[in-house]
Amino acid sequence: MGCVLYSIFDCLPQQAYPKYSFNYGIKDPHTGDIKSQAEERDGDVVKGQYSLVEPDGSVRTVDYTADDHNGFNAVVHKSAPAAHKVIAAPAVHLAHAPVLSHYLH
């Protein structure tokens, strides 16, 4: 790694060129958590998208960009809700404690 010479006594390391990309997705049928994201950076420009399923079944998708000239910009899209599926919770049986008519000290 090279360095940038600021004075005869100071030599600071040069920063590596910023470049990356990543993506991930989650689909958990137990919790209903469904989402994904993808992003890439090349120098000072970042582009990406993420999406998630809302509680009503609609899908929110956000496309975004960021750079030094335009700043951060996002465009949000939302799909119509999916047909709502009702999932019944399992029945819970409670046993109540007996009521005491007398209280002894």
Image: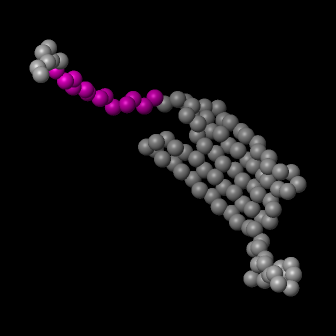
Q: Is residue 94 above or below residue 24?
A: above
Does residue 82 appear anywhere in the picture?
no
Q: Is residue 89 magenta?
A: yes
Could you tell me which quadrant the N terminus lies in? bottom right
Residue 104 position in % (x across, y down): 11, 20
Q: Which residues are magenta?
A: 86-98
Does residue 31 appear anywhere in the picture?
yes
Q: Is residue 10 magenta?
A: no
Q: Residue at x 72, y 60 (%)?
A: 40
Number of marks present in the image shown = 0
Camera-nearest residue between 76 and 6:
6
Quadrant assignment, res 34: top right
Could you tell me which quadrant the C terminus lies in? top left
- 69 relative to 12 in the view: left or right: right
Q: Residue at x 63, y 58 (%)?
A: 23
Q: Residue furthest front?
A: 105
Residue 57 position in % (x across, y down): 57, 34
Residue 5 position in % (x across, y down): 85, 81
Camera-nearest residue between 19 and 79:
19
Q: Is residue 52 above or below residue 96?
A: below
Quadrant assignment, res 22: bottom right
Q: Residue at x 17, y 18 (%)?
A: 99
Q: Is residue 86 above or below residue 60?
A: above
- 80 relative to 15 in the view: left or right: left
